[in-house]
Image (tube, rainbow, N blue to C red):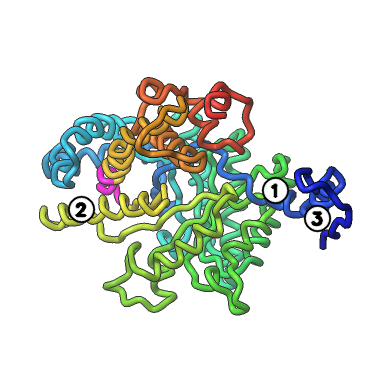
């Protein structure tokens, strides 16, 4: 507790001096260290807009290209991308802007984040078979990376650390990583996914495994990071009333990169009837709200889950599934979840249409407000620094995902890409830029 000063002072003179501020600094030193170490904020690097899950035994180096071709074929069989944009109700001006961008995306980078699945999408198989597929997955990823055809982010989801699958999950991870290391440097965008987490101790166990693997392969400390799937209620609310989803971030030694919501496992765990299991069920929204608060300020990213209603079947069923998927993607974005899962090539058109439209529709207003803020002009909206950061983050995300170009942002806001990033993520490690001077 801070001691009270007994010194008297004139009515118009400051009462608090250097010694009082020094005491204040001492009392709040732990708080300062906590905020700096545990809440560094987002670093402003690219976050994929989706994660594509495929069973690990189906992985081939050309998989992203084939998914792009299949997505375009699905469109061709039921009209065109422009017609789909119209069916989704996109404004004509927005559609004119996003349709060519999405068409190019499907041809050049249809998958941003690829997860080779050894868990639910793969099932239980003989050990020899899974061993072989783990080695094949490593070889396929290494070949794609060497050829320049790998997605920016790629990795595996191994089996959970529950007792029945723990040994198998660790062995698959071990074999996969050994195969990657043998082929050359690890991919920059390597992602490992730990599913069905129920306790903080399982996350700490994963940290231990990462440390062992780094030591065995001569990797730098901290090189291996992982995502945690939030798909059990025990991770949202523990038996003692605590929130493990928040605790695990701070007990993982900086190794947790993201929290991913698992739609169907979580829904089943809280006994939602199958027909009502959905990313937009109130139970799902509650779990994701907890995730959002737990990750706020930590730099740990969030991903929504998936819909199992795929664009397959009759033309009417396909159109209905596209409408649903686009609406769910948009809903996730509006709720602050900038990533989700896709399970089929035909979901890619609606993933990118809905995502790009989200940024294009909000861009004109955000750009105008940013320009006013940077230039200190007046206007009908008086934005505070926190709002300016939110506007800058919105535009910066749009730029990183390809919905907006750096040239148009510079034209409309007066900010370069580097300056925009500095305004959006002021706590990220970076040199000082002109943008800092403009907004002071």
Image quadrant of residue 114?
Answer: top left
List the residue tagged with mark 3: 27
Q: Who's the residue at 43% across and 64% down the image?
A: 123
In the picture of the structure, the residue carrying the numbered disc 2 is: 323
Q: Secondary structure at mark 2?
A: helix
The location of residue 385, given as percent across then percent down, is 51, 39
Q: Which element is circle 3 on?
A: helix
User: Between disc 3 and disc 2, whose residue precedes?
Assistant: 3
| Whole-number angstrom distance, CA of label 1 to CA of label 2 | 43 Å
| Real-space Cα separation, disc 3 to disc 2, in angstroms | 55 Å
Q: Earlier in the sequence, mark 1 or mark 3?
A: 3
- Report the label total: 3
Q: Is residue 238 left or right of residue 221?
A: left
Quick check: marks 1 and 3 in contact, CB under 8 Å?
no
Residue 150 appears in the rendering:
no
Q: Which residue, given by chain and number where applicable, does mark 1 sit on?
A: 37
Q: Position of residue 113 (x, y in %)?
A: 44, 43
Residue 223 magenta-drawn? no
Task: State yes or no: discs 3 and 2 in contact (Cβ < 8 Å).
Answer: no
Give the secondary structure at mark 1.
helix
Residue nearest the observer in this picture, 306 or 361: 361
Q: Could you tell me residue 17's position as x and y percent?
A: 83, 45
**In the drawing, does residue 168 fall left or right of residue 371?**
right
Residue lying at 46% horizontally and 62% vertically, measured from the top left = 289
Residue 314 in the image: state x and y as whole percent. Answer: 11, 56
**433 or 291, which lies in front?**
433
How much space separates mark 1 and mark 3, taking CA atoms? 17 Å
For the record, the magenta segment spans 344-350
Q: Residue at x 55, y 55 (%)?
A: 295
């Amino acid at each position: 507790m801070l001691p009270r000063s007994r010194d008297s002072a004139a009515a118009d003179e400051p009462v608090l001096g250097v010694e009082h501020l020094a005491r204040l600094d001492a009392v709040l030193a732990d708080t300062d260290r906590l905020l700096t170490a545990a809440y560094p904020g987002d670093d402003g690097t690219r976050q994929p807009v989706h994660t594509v899950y495929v069973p690990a035994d189906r992985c081939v180096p050309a998989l992203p290209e084939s998914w792009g071709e299949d997505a375009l074929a699905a469109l061709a069989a039921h009209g065109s991308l422009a017609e789909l944009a119209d069916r989704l109700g996109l404004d004509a001006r927005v559609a004119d802007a996003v349709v060519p961008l999405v068409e190019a995306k499907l041809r050049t980078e249809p998958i941003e984040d690829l997860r080779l699945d050894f868990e639910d999408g793969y099932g239980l198989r003989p050990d020899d078979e899974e061993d072989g597929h783990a080695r094949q997955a490593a070889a396929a990823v290494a070949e794609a990376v060497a050829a320049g055809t790998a997605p920016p982010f790629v990795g595996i989801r191994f089996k959970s650390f529950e007792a029945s699958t723990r040994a198998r999950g660790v062995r698959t991870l071990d074999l996969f990583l050994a195969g990657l290391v043998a082929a050359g440097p690890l991919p920059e965008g390597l992602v490992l996914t730990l599913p069905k987490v129920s306790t903080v101790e399982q996350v700490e166990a994963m940290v231990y495994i990462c440390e062992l693997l780094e030591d065995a392969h001569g990797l730098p400390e901290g090189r291996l990071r992982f995502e945690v799937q939030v798909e059990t209620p025990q991770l949202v609310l523990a038996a003692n009333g605590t929130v493990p989803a928040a605790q695990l971030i701070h007990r993982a030694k900086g190794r947790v990169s993201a929290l991913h919501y698992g739609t169907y496992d979580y829904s089943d765990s809280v006994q939602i009837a199958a027909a009502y299991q959905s990313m937009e069920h109130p139970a799902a929204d509650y779990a994701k709200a907890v995730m959002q608060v737990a990750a706020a300020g930590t730099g740990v990213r969030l991903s929504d889950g998936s819909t199992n209603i795929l664009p397959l079947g009759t033309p009417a069923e396909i159109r209905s599934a596209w409408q649903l998927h686009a609406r769910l993607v948009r809903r996730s974005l509006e709720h602050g979840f900038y990533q989700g899962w896709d399970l089929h090539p035909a979901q890619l058109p609606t993933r990118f249409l809905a995502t790009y439209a989200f940024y294009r529709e909000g861009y004109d207003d955000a750009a105008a407000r940013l320009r006013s803020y940077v230039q200190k002009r007046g206007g009908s909206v008086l934005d505070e620094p926190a709002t300016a950061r939110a506007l800058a983050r919105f535009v910066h995300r749009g730029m990183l995902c390809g919905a907006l170009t750096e040239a148009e942002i510079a034209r409309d806001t007066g900010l370069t890409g580097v300056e925009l990033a500095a305004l959006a993520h002021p706590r990220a490690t970076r040199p000082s830029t002109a943008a800092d001077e403009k907004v002071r």
